Image (cartoon, coloured by chain):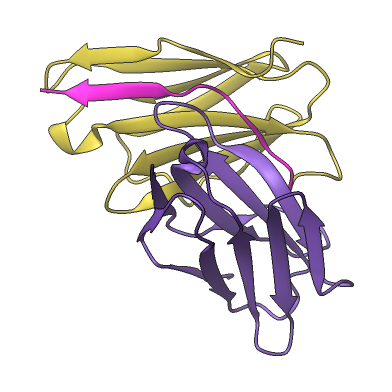
Amino acid sequence: GENVEQHPSTLSVQEGDSAVIKCTYSDSASNYFPWYKQELGKRPQLIIDIRSNVGEKKDQRIAVTLNKTAKHFSLHITETQPEDSAVYFCAASRPGGSYIPTFGRGTSLIVHP
Amino acid sequence: DAGVIQSPRHEVTEMGQEVTLRCKPISGHDYLFWYRQTMMRGLELLIYFNNNVPIDDSGMPEDRFSAKMPNASFSTLKIQPSEPRDSAVYFCASSLAGQQNIQYFGAGTRLSVL
């Protein structure tokens, strides 16, 4: 089955700095890569996703990149703000009968004011 | 729609007691998932249903755990007997058919087994 590794487990940055979270996956058939944000005490919520037919996608201060050859994808947050502090999960899923995503272990991002 | 609804939000129980967690998926969603979240293991998929039928329960840790979905709007996750190592946050999520990879999570149940 799919295996998703996520690094780092904890990331601490100063407000205004950039943050990068990286994930690798094992199943070359995976073609959908969502990112979820979980604020303290809240539910995980989808914030951005990328499909294998594109290499990069942006939405305001966040962007995701995908390298299918290397089987890794990353979340980039620019101009971080305290409200970006949360746990971020990456996931990967494959097409076909089972689209069920496999989640990474999560990255706890702390943005210091 | 109110989203995925879980109850209770918090549960504190003693070791050996039975615990039942409840979930109401988003209306019209065909898939329902149960996850367990711990610091050590992150988000673990326990079991998922399609049209009320359990499809994959390979993530259920042991026989003390069971899940049912008697109808399209209700599911339960039961732990009997509970143990301290079951302490975790349990999430329910649902999704549409063909979009199982886009999941909508409930607020979770924080379970503490003393």
- The chain drawn yellow is chain what? B
Residue drawn at the location 55% of the way across and 36% of the way down: A44
Query: Percent position (x, y) of residue A84?
Result: 52, 42
Query: Percent position (x, y) of residue A111?
Result: 41, 47
Q: Nearer the viewer, residue A87 or B65?
A: A87
Q: Quadrant of the C terminus of chain B?
A: top left
The quarter of the picture where residue A77 lies is bottom right
Residue drawn at the location 68% of the way across and 43% of the way down: A47
Residue A98 in sight:
no
Left or right, residue B95 beside residue B90: right
Q: Quadrant of the N terminus of chain B?
A: top right
Would residue B89 be counted in the magenta stretch? no
Would residue B109 be counted in the magenta stretch? yes
The quarter of the picture where residue B112 lies is top left
Total numbered labels: 0
In the rendered image of the structure, the colour used to display chain A is purple
Residue drawn at the location 40% of the way across and 54% of the way down: A14
Residue B1 in sight:
yes
Which residue is most to the bottom? Answer: A69
Query: Percent position (x, y) of residue A106?
Result: 44, 54
Q: Which residues are magenta?
A: B101-114
Q: Nearer the viewer, residue A87 or A26?
A: A87
Residue drawn at the location 87% of the way across and 71% of the way down: A54
Left or right, residue B81 beside residue B88: left
Q: Nearer the viewer, residue B63 or A67?
A: A67
Question: Measured along the vertical axis of the image, is residue B42 above or below residue B63?
Answer: below
